[in-house]
Amino acid sequence: MMSVTPIPALSDNYIWLLRQDNSQSVCVVDPGEAAPVIEFLERESLTLSCILITHHHHDHTGGLAELIKRYAPHVIGPANPEIKGIDETVGDGDEVRIMGRLFDVMATPGHTLDHISYFTAGIPALLFCGDTLFCAGCGRLFEGTPEQMYTALKKIAELPEDTLVFAAHEYTQANLTFARAADPENEDVKHALQECDKARALDRPTLPSTIGRELKINPYLRVGTDSVRQAAGTQGVNNDDLATFTTLREWKNRF
């Protein structure tokens, strides 16, 4: 059984640590800084054998150099020369074996052009989606287009509903506050925000989510519903889900 443990980093990042059964060899995803990873590994007497990278932003790669120097792990990531230390470049449709499990690589551009996500089927199914899909939200469009992000989210939304979603940031509270405005008739959003507020008051992570839960509470995955379209002011605009998504993402930027 593969376990996944959050290592809090920077102001609101999670570095996810993957461990198979009781193996002392582990993998981490998107180490934005090295210190918390080293502290965790040393405390638990673990060895870092692999690193997965989703995209080039510094808060996802900032710890690479120090971790490579200390542990010499195998680093897997997108084909982007801005990321120093990649041993194996991967893209859409590729497969990688991590901790004994086969992961599918999915191109998920929008937040950045090089963004990829990692999905493994099984019990449980796991998705590491960086800054593409958040709980109740999605990443800002720094490099890609609304169409690219919308297409990426549709691809993710087709994964099994019991898939655990490991996003890279603790943005749930802010995202649900926006979702309440963007999907005001949604009782699932109201309940999720109450649960989120309780968890954050206790300094507990709100992740992982699941695909099934996101389909109920994430306005960017609900752009075809009347409630979201009415809130976005796109009801009757060519019945266009992409137009609704674009409006929501721009609204969130100002929210």
Image (cartoon, helix red, strand yellow):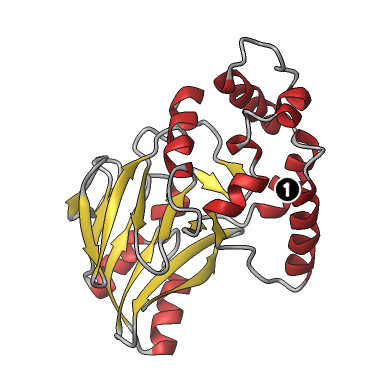
Q: Is residue 143 something one can see in this rendering? A: no
Q: Which residue lies under the disc numbered 1?
A: 176
At x 58%, y 37%, the residue is: 221
Foreground pick, 168 / 156: 156
Q: What residue type is disc 1 on?
A: Leu
Residue at x-position 58% and y-position 63% = 207
Measured along the vertical axis of the image, is residue 154 above or below residue 74? above
Q: Position of residue 160 (x, y in %)?
A: 44, 53
Residue 149, given in percent of the width and then of the height, sits at 47, 31
Nearest the eye: 110 or 10: 110
Q: Is residue 200 left or right of residue 66?
A: right
Say which element carries label 1.
helix
In the rendered image of this protein, does residue 83 appear above or below residue 162?
A: above
Residue located at (38% from left, 54% from top): 61
Picture residue at 35% right of the left edge, 53% below the top: 118
Residue farthest toward the left in the current orientation of the protein: 87
Quadrant of the drawing holding the C terminus: top right
3 to the left or right of 120: right
Asked which quadrant contains residue 72, the reply is bottom left
- Which quadrant of the rendered structure holds the N terminus? bottom left
Q: Is residue 200 left or right of residue 96?
A: right
Which one is nearer the viewer's eye here, 10 or 89?
A: 89
* Residue 19 can be seen in this image: yes
Q: Residue 242 appears at what percent x and percent y?
A: 55, 21
Residue that protrudes farthest toward the top in the picture: 238
Left or right for 31, reference 188: left
Q: Nearer the viewer, residue 5 or 43?
A: 5
Residue 50 in the image: state x and y as whole percent.
26, 67
Q: How dense is the environment of label 1, judged by Cα within 10 Å: few (below 14), some, or many (20 and up)? A: many
Residue 4 against residue 162 in the figure, above or below? below
